[in-house]
Image (cartoon, rainbow, N blue to C red):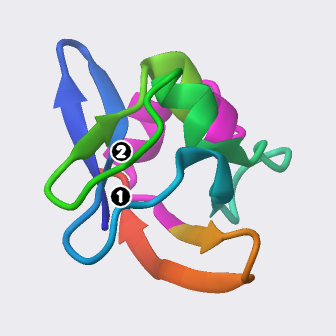
Amino acid sequence: SAEFVKNGSDIVLRLSHNGGDALNPKDIKVTAYVASASSNGEQLIIKDIIGDDNAWNAGESILLTADKTKTLLGINDVSSAAEKSTPVEIGIYHTPSTNVIYHATILIE
């Protein structure tokens, strides 16, 4: 799942593995689409966020940094987007199988 949370003075994205088999972080891609963004954000690979860990296990969450959140969304002012309750389409995909693990529209709040 995905949700926006406060981390200090920043609003960041938290990704949670809610159940099932462990996932290989290098096989998991995260995308975001913000209709109001001036440019497309960059997709992220979970391995690039968590480093050398070779498994993303059920029950584990990943908290993106403010910079990674901005990169994924393609916006510089996440706080301003939160003031407007901006909708964001988040996708989490298993790249080898092309299966969708998670897909939803959530609000930056």
Q: Residue at x 14, y 56 (%)?
A: 59
* Residue 96 x %, y %: 76, 72
**The residue tagged with tag 1: helix, strand or loop?**
loop
In the image, 25: left or right of 44?
left
Q: Residue at x 72, y 82 (%)?
A: 97
Q: Is residue 80 found inside the magenta-colored segment of the image?
A: yes
The amino acid beneath tag 1 is Ser
On screen, residue 83 above or below 94: above
Residue that label 1 marks: 85
Q: Residues within 10 Å of mark 2 (few under 14, many from 20)?
A: some
Find the residue positioned furthest to the right: 39
**The residue tagged with tag 2: helix, strand or loop?**
helix
Q: Is residue 71 found inside the magenta-colored segment of the image?
A: yes
Residue 68 position by quadrant? top right
Observer able to see residue 1: yes
Q: Residue at x 72, y 49 (%)?
A: 37
Q: Which residues are magenta?
A: 70-88
